[in-house]
Amino acid sequence: MFGITATLLLLLAAVFTLHIVRLNYVMSRTPRAARAHALEPLTAERIRETYERVRGKGIDWRGKLPRRKERRYIIVGGSGLVGGQLALDLLQMGVPPAAIRLMDIRRSARAEFSSGPASEVRFVDADVTSEGGMFRAFDEPWDEAVARLPLTVFHTVALIRPFERSEALYERCSRVNVAGTANVLAAARRAGAGVFVYTSSCHAAVRSTGWFFPPWLREPRNFVQFVGDGDFWEPMPRPRDFASNYARSKAEGERLVCGADDDDGMDDGEPGATREGGNNKNNNNNKGNNRVRMRTAAIRPGNGVYGHKDDTIVGRIMKLRRVPTYSGPWVHNWVNVRNVTQAHLLLEDALLGPHADRVAGRPFMVSDAGPPLRFQDVYDVLATTSATGMRVDHPPPVLMLLAAYAVEAYCLLLLATASARTSTMTPLKRLLRLLGVPPALLAKMRVGVVREPGEPLVLFQPALFSSSVTSIIDDSAARRAPQEGGLGYRPACTTVEGMCLQVVHWNEWIERRRLEGAAAAE
């Protein structure tokens, strides 16, 4: 009997080992289905040529923006990457600072808001998880010169945790991305907003990857995904089908916003339309036939948003200077934050135009111009052009995936132990002991000494791998003209151009710091 058991165990171990070796092979190569869509691997010469060109000529962002409108603007999440850039774009379009309001839980740390017109934009401390707090923030009075202008709301807030997938942890994302969105919607409607634009994510359409796949398949399920807007018109997937909790929460928030589109009532620019206006608080509910209708829609940036030295992807990589990767050969679209904000402003323009019914109540995917890149191309751009240099380590990707499962198991074990801390779950305690958890460690967990790992380790969980697989973005709907149900979206740059310009700004910032340090030392 023992011999049969041992043989079965050895056979299972051999099958598992063969699968792991095969999976590592698959993960280490660009998927066949993506090769026809991806840009040819970048050469150092091409990278340097693009860098020098954008350093000398820059990129024409202003020429892609719509005309200025006589409106007020509330940007919820105005201290974030997209929200802050929206405010700067509005100022560049000629909108006065008094007509722009930033709402967030903290002020923007961007240097642009410390001087010039941007420093005159009012900031209101507001937490989207509090409905009453949002109502109070929206009730803050406006300058008399702009108080009666119609109102547009850009909702850009998001809690981004693409590394978690357990339903037990879903509330971490949903309290901000779903419940918070509902609070902002309610406050905007109460204030008489005529336009509500939501910053969604292409992750709303990204599905989980089946890493352990049968031998007759060439690659894991959903290892290559072609992502557009079509999923929005289908029933909501099951929670486990999303790549992460973040993806699910953005899909739910997006449907809340798009479902709130109102085609009744009056346009907010029409005479007699009733709106809050900021200083008048006698009309909060906008009752009656002459109430303002609120047109809503969403922008799905796809895939990673970059464009500032403090962004959470490219900016973080440049600051770290050395990073491990499992995704070098995988293919992704990217989108510069300036292209994202252009899309938001074009969407507002379309919602106020004669073809609003064709664009309202739906999301639009947007990405940079040109074909998608391999992650390795991104690393090569940064390593070739950054003054601070960059090194990329390439451990076997399957080992990183297995480690990710271990990190996830550890985090869920802590969650289970935290639950046991406040109850008499004797079976759970027995299970933890059967799993070999030492009593001393359990005691530490019960008093909160042992916690989840911090960044970057906590990021390496299976959901992040699913969020990083090859994703080819289809933004053709946004590129159609408004009369055809699109936005007339024309991205101002390719990803290589956009990232090279980001490195130009990074290198200039590094040089300024060096000169300031040298001057201080004299």
Image (tube, rainbow, N blue to C red):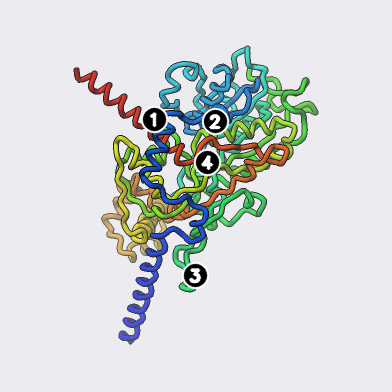
Cα separation between marks 1 and 2:
26 Å
Q: Give the side of residue 243 with respect to residue 184, left or right.
A: left
What residue is pinned by disc 4? 368
Residue 115 horizontal/vertical position (percent):
43, 17
Determine whether the residue tagged by mark 4 lies in a helix, strand or loop: loop
Cα separation between marks 4 and 3:
32 Å
Which of the marked residues, 4 or 1, is nearer the chain's N terminus? 4
Q: Is residue 451 visible?
A: no
Residue 122 position (above or below residue 398) = above
What residue is pinned by disc 1? 505
Q: Give the side of residue 309 with respect to residue 61, left or right.
A: left
Which of the marked residues, 3 or 1, is nearer the chain's N terminus? 3
Residue at 41% of width from left, 30% of height from top? Answer: 55
Amino acid beneath label 2: Val
Residue 391 position (above or below residue 409) = above
Q: Please identify, in this view, whether the residue under mark 4 or under mark 3 is nearer the observer.
A: 4
What residue is pinned by disc 3? 217
Cα separation between marks 4 and 1:
19 Å
Q: Which residue lies furthest to the right in this view?
A: 289
**What is the number of callouts on the image?**
4
Cα separation between marks 2 and 3:
45 Å
Amino acid beneath label 3: Leu
Cα separation between marks 2 and 4:
24 Å
Which of the marked residues, 2 or 3, is nearer the chain's N terminus? 2
* Closer to us: 419 or 160: 160
Which of the marked residues, 2 or 4, is nearer the chain's N terminus? 2
* Closer to us: 453 or 478: 478
Q: Label 1 neighbourhood size at 10 Å, few (<14), some (14-19), many (20+)?
A: some
Which of the marked residues, 4 or 3, is nearer the chain's N terminus? 3
Cα separation between marks 3 and 1:
45 Å
